[in-house]
Image (spheres, rainbow, N blue to C red):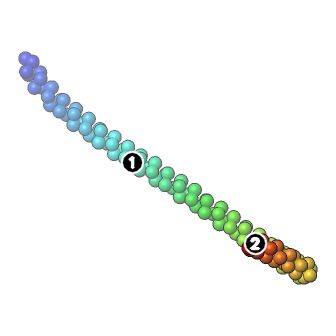
Amino acid sequence: MTDKAGDAAAPDLTAELAALRADIARLSDTMAGLMRGQVDAAGAAVKGAVGDARSQISQAACHAQESAFGAAADIERRIERNPLTAVLIAVGIGMALGMMTKSRG
């Protein structure tokens, strides 16, 4: 009698194992899909951050360039207004550099 019960339970067990394998395969596919979604989201976030950083660096470079051009224009205006002062400052800087680079030997 136990042999008949064991023989009857074997197909049920085989069917349950097959169903369990199918469930595990579906679970594995679902997890792989979720992981791909997370990776894609992380990649998009990194691309967005890089784009923002690039934009900020570009804006900072433009601002620095505008400031440099403004300073150069201001210096030119001062030289045009006070040419003698500009020449005397240039002579003083030249003499200071000459004295600092003069060999002491």
Judge from the rendering whether residue 18 lies leftward or rightward of residue 53; answer left or right: left
Residue 47 vertical position relative to residue 14 in the rendered view, above or below: below
Mark sitting on residue 66: none
Asked whether the viewer can see residue 75, the reply is no
Q: Residues within 10 Å of mark 2 (few under 14, many from 20)?
A: few
Mark sitting on residue 33: 1
Judge from the rendering whether residue 72 lies leftward or rightward of residue 48; answer left or right: right
Residue at left 9%, top 18%?
A: 2
Amino acid carrying label 1: it is Gly
Query: Residue 82: which quarter of the image?
Result: bottom right
Q: Reading the chain from its start, which is encountered first: label 1 or label 2?
A: 1
In this rendered view, identify the residue nearer to me: 22 or 96: 96
Judge from the rendering whether residue 70 lies leftward or rightward of residue 18; answer left or right: right
For the C terminus, the quadrant is bottom right
Residue at left 29%, top 38%?
A: 23
For mark 2, give the secondary structure. Answer: loop
For the N terminus, the quadrant is top left
For mark 1, give the secondary structure. Answer: helix
Residue at left 92%, top 81%?
A: 84
Amino acid carrying label 2: it is Arg
Query: Residue 5: which quarter of the image?
Result: top left
Residue located beneath label 2 in the image: 104
Alpha carbon separation for disc pair 1 and 2 = 76 Å
